[in-house]
Image (spheres, rainbow, N blue to C red):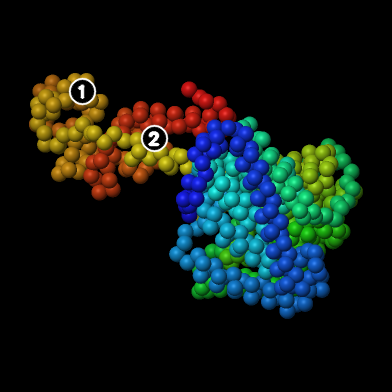
């Protein structure tokens, strides 16, 4: 749902709203406010998340659930199971009969940045609770939903332009991620690559402002330290083939993860289990896996830093990787709310360690650092699942501060991105859109194409004649040059198109037809008011027609549309959208 703000928007003075629409600085100011709000959201969610972990699993204050040992087995089993039951019942009660909430990517792709603040709040609470009870899902869905939802609400209050609203939504999501990882550059590029769908010069300052103010807000109000990463030597050119091969391997693992979550979800749907019981069953399975290792619980943020530096065997890393993949697939598939961003980072670290251990067994002395391959794997697998190669590369840069290592990470991330696109074609988010029947490959604004419908373009005054009109009468009513097209009807229903030129060509024949029946063409081809302009242009091309009648599904004539007019409107709108992206006004 994408309901508009309440009538409270009328309390914003009209002069101030005009100023917000006219000045680029006002968008930057709004982005700064969005950044502060996103930082506060991350702080609040992290506090709630940690409180649930400490309350349910009895872990020490400030400890990370995914690396805490000695948790009583009963709590490991009951926490996700009973939490899943409560989650399922509450979600069923709150969301019964409701449409699926709109996430930031879908909002920017289809709705011009419009999001429901109520739906965003519900998704945020669901994500917080899911990860809080131990489900193997990431918090990023809640972070970005809350940040983007607040940004969309503010933008609609001030009635900013469509392009600026999409930008603010991207600022909200990027700022939340930047604050969550204390990585403002990474957060800004998350907004660019995954939520806005493009790198646009006019968007640079607002995006950076939002991300940096969010990270600063968190640093000031809730600073958080992480274990130091091991010192790494700069990789050499001889390491590049191994890095690229690891990128390919991570792409394959990422595809398995995305397919696995979908298959588990399909399995739950085919089962006889009611929807509200599925999270409880999923939580029980996650709890059983966690009896062996707590790393499968929750997002695994603490485990990422631990396993980058920790030594381990090939068997241990391999088993942990399989367990985390299974736990995340079961959590998502059973209905818990959350994402795979955080989880994919841990999977990538484990995949990198498996790769390094296997490579060392095959080629002793080839691997100079297991931690190096763990970092490469972290970024590469996250790119395969989430997308955004520059986003994940900058995460590695801000984690390590090592530019030479970052170049190697970029190579692995690029390889993973290429292989995933060629073999699978989707990120996890766009894959789920695809399963729902939405043709969305990213956050690029295709919503305006759906809004530009045949019904909004067609001409309602239609030159038309009854199908039994005599040829002479038709020629008298429409002399040469009076119209470019004619529509024939029968009993008020569409019968076909008649070329005006054919009226006079037929009249010169030795045996001209008595009426229009013999001149009909395109009798089975017409447009419908709800069709998009892209569908209309495809129909024009297939029919090889300059104009087509517009009819209802029952065949009633409601208008006519020419290909020339449709192409002009499409080109004009494309030029306007391009101008919004580049900051230029196109003639």
At horizontal 24% and vertical 45% (from top left) the residue drawn is: 555
Say if residue 423 shows up in the picture: no
State which tag comes first along the sequence, 2 or 1: 1
Say if residue 4 shows up in the picture: yes
For discs 2 and 1, the disc positioned in front in the rendered view: 1
Between residues 420 and 477, which one lies in front from this camera angle? 477
Q: Position of residue 517 (x, y in %)?
A: 15, 35
Splitting the image into 4 quarters, where does residue 313 fall? bottom right
- Could you tell me how far apart the alpha carbons at marks 2 and 1 are, in whole angstroms? 25 Å
Whether residue 259 sits left or right of residue 308 in the image: it is left
Determine whether the residue tagged by mark 2 lies in a helix, strand or loop.
helix
Pointer 2 residue = 537
Whether residue 481 is situated above or below residue 24 in the rendered picture: above
At horizontal 22% and vertical 37% (from top left) the residue drawn is: 496
Splitting the image into 4 quarters, where does residue 318 fall? bottom right
Pointer 1 residue = 482
């Amino acid at each position: 749902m994408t309901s508009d703000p309440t009538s409270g928007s009328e309390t914003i003075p009209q002069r101030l709203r005009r100023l917000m629409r006219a000045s680029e600085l006002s968008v930057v100011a709004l982005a700064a406010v969005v950044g502060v709000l996103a930082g506060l959201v991350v702080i609040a969610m992290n506090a709630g998340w940690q409180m649930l972990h400490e309350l349910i699993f009895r872990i020490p204050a400030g400890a990370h659930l995914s690396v805490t040992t000695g948790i009583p087995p009963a709590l490991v089993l009951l926490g996700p199971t009973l939490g899943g039951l409560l989650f399922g019942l509450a979600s069923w009660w709150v969301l019964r009969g409701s449409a699926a909430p709109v996430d930031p990517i879908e909002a920017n792709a289809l709705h011009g940045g419009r999001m429901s603040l109520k739906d965003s709040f519900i998704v945020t609470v669901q994500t917080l609770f899911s990860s809080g009870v131990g489900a193997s899902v990431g918090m990023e869905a809640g972070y970005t939903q809350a940040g983007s939802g607040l940004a969309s609400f503010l933008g609609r209050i001030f009635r900013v332009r469509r392009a600026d609203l999409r930008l603010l939504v991207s600022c909200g999501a990027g700022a939340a991620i930047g604050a969550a990882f204390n990585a403002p550059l990474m957060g800004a590029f998350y907004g660019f690559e995954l939520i806005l769908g493009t790198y646009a010069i006019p968007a640079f300052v607002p995006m950076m402002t939002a991300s940096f103010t969010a990270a600063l807000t968190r640093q000031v109000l809730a600073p958080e330290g992480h274990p130091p990463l091991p010192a790494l030597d700069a990789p050499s050119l001889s390491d590049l083939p191994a890095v690229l091969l690891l990128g390919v391997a991570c792409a394959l693992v990422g595809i398995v993860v995305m397919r696995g979550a979908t298959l588990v979800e399909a399995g739950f749907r085919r089962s006889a289990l009611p929807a509200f019981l599925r999270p409880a069953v999923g939580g029980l399975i996650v709890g059983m896996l966690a009896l062996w290792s707590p790393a499968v619980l929750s997002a695994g943020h603490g485990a990422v830093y631990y396993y980058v530096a920790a030594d381990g065997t090939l068997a241990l890393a391999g088993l942990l990787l399989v367990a985390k993949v299974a736990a995340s697939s079961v959590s998502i598939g059973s209905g818990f709310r959350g994402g795979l961003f955080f989880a994919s980072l841990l999977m990538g670290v484990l995949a990198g360690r498996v790769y390094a251990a296997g490579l060392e067994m095959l080629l002793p002395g080839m691997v100079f650092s297991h931690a190096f391959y763990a970092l490469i794997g972290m970024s590469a697998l996250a790119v395969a699942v989430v997308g955004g190669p520059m986003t994940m590369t900058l995460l590695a840069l801000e984690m390590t501060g090592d530019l030479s290592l970052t170049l190697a990470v970029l190579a692995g991330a690029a390889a993973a991105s290429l292989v995933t696109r060629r073999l699978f074609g989707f990120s996890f988010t766009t894959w789920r859109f695809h399963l729902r029947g939405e043709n969305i490959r990213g956050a690029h604004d295709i919503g305006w194409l759906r809004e530009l419908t045949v019904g909004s373009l067609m001409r309602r005054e239609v030159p038309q004649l009854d199908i039994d009109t005599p040829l002479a009468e038709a020629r008298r009513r429409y002399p040469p040059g009076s119209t470019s097209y004619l529509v024939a009807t029968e009993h008020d229903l569409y019968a076909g198109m008649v070329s005006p030129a054919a009226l006079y060509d037929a009249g010169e024949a030795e045996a001209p037809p008595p009426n229009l029946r013999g001149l009909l063409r395109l009798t089975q081809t017409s447009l419908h008011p709800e069709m998009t302009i892209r569908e209309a242009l495809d129909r024009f091309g297939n029919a090889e027609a300059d104009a087509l009648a517009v009819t209802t599904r029952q065949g009633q004539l409601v208008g006519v549309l020419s290909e020339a007019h449709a192409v002009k409107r499409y080109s004009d709108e494309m030029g306007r959208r391009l101008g919004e992206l580049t900051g230029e006004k196109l003639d």
